[in-house]
Image (cartoon, rainbow, N blue to C red):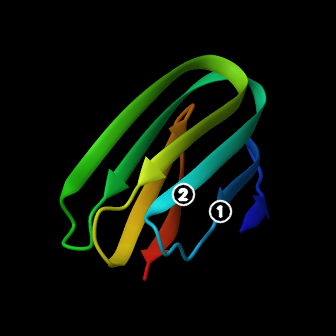
Amino acid sequence: MTTIASDNFSRYQVSPNPTRDGYVNVRVELTELDALVLRLYAPNGALLQTEQHDADNYHATRLYLPVAGTYVLEMLSRGTKRSVKLIRR
């Protein structure tokens, strides 16, 4: 999934989504140099992981979804939040 966003988020991509092996690549491009916080929530709503990235225009990481279900990835930068559903089959 690739999405062109507004405000500080230029675009973001999560792939593969859905995933079979649990690994998801996340790429986020910001319009300006800025820090990025990623929060991954489990299917039951519990916070699984938090990543803090230093100021940059481009951020990339790989996440692991341990069990089948629907997860929520929150991306926060400069007071703006984007949420994406991630699915492991």
Q: In whole angstroms, how far apart are the C-alphas of marks 1 and 2?
A: 5 Å
20 versus 15 height, above or below: below
Decide which of 54, 34 is in the foreground and name it.
54
Picture quarter with the C terminus: bottom left
Q: What residue type is labelled 1?
A: Ser
For image coordinates 38% across by 46% down, the residue present is 39
Say which quarter of the image contains residue 38: top left
**Residue 78 appears at what percent x and percent y?**
57, 31
Q: Give the labeled residue for mark 1.
A: 15
Decide which of 85, 34 is in the foreground and name it.
85
**Residue 53 appears at what percent x and percent y?**
51, 24
56 versus 49 height, above or below: above
**Farthest-out residue, front:** 21
Q: What residue type is labelled 2?
A: Val
Describe the element under mark 2 as helix, strand or loop: strand
88 versus 2 height, above or below: below
Q: Could you tell me if residue 26 is visible in this image?
A: yes
**Residue 21 appears at what percent x and percent y?**
46, 68
Picture quarter with the N terminus: bottom right
For image coordinates 36% across by 52% down, the residue present is 40
Q: Give the labeled residue for mark 2.
A: 24
Q: Is residue 66 left or right of residue 74?
A: left
Task: Tell me which label, 1 or 2, sits earlier in the chain.
Answer: 1
60 versus 39 height, above or below: above
Do labels 1 and 2 touch, CB within 8 Å? yes
Q: Could you tell me if residue 8 is visible in this image?
A: no
Q: Counting other residues with Cα less than 10 Å from the Cα at mark 1, is it few (<14), some (14-19), or many (20 or more)?
A: some
Q: Is residue 31 left or right of residue 24?
A: right
